[in-house]
Amino acid sequence: MLDISNSDRLGPNLRALRQERGLTLDRLAGMSELTRGYLSLVERGLKTPSITALLRVANALQVNIAQLFDLNAAPNVRYTLQRAGDHSSPEKGYGLLPLATGRAAKMMEPFLMRPARSPGTIGGPRWAHGGEEMLFVVSGKIAVKLGGEEILMSQGDCLYFSGEERHEIRSLGDEQAEVLVVIASGAAPNTARADG
């Protein structure tokens, strides 16, 4: 599990992609509908971005999320393989492991997520983005706020919904939950949004 706040690649890669395109932090902030300060914190590794924020930045830079984590991601590799030992699990708190980062051109964005226990700690209280999303609870229990409904889920449960529905995911109980999150694209660029 990669704790994005401690990622040694995301911040520098974001800065490199932004500068390669001749964009200032202010300009990227306007294009991604995020604040300059937020982007600066992400670039310096001091802020944990949500999946929605990653989608916004990738759309604004016209790259796949994989390229935010791996500048050498190849669009047409036959497959990517990530072994269980290729990552470590943070002891607590929000963690996000982007999967299949070696392939840039893909129709799905898969992640292994450890949701925070308290609501509103990452990316604002509710997220929304283009495309569709699937959640599969690998371990633990979670609560998903979807629209006006709260859905409780346990290990083995699966939820599929439109990413445009505002949603929030948090861990429940003593055990830190792990959730496979798959976002299927299909949205026009710059459609990801968060409700603060």
Image (cartoon, helix red, strand yellow):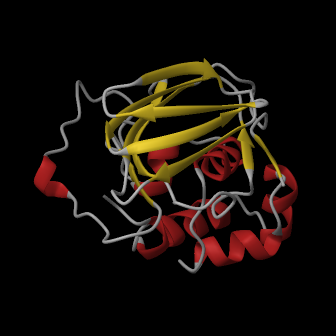
The image shows residue 173 at horizontal and vertical percentages of 42, 55
* Residue 64 in view here: no
Relative to 113, residue 2 above or below: below
The image shows residue 125 at horizontal and vertical percentages of 74, 53
The image shows residue 62 at horizontal and vertical percentages of 65, 41
Task: Report whether 145 appears left or right of 155.
Answer: right
Q: Tell me where residue 9 sits by quadrant.
A: bottom left
Quadrant of the drawing holding the N terminus: bottom left
Relative to 111, residue 33 above or below: below
* Residue 77 in view here: yes
Task: Report whether 62 appears left or right of 159.
Answer: right
Q: Nearer the viewer, residue 84 or 28?
A: 84
Quadrant of the drawing holding the C terminus: bottom right
Q: Determine the residue located farthest toward the front in the rendered image.
A: 173
Q: Nearer the viewer, residue 76 or 153?
A: 153
Task: Report whether 85 appears left or right of 139.
Answer: left
Task: Report whether 63 appears left or right of 60.
Answer: left
Q: Nearer the viewer, residue 4 or 156?
A: 156
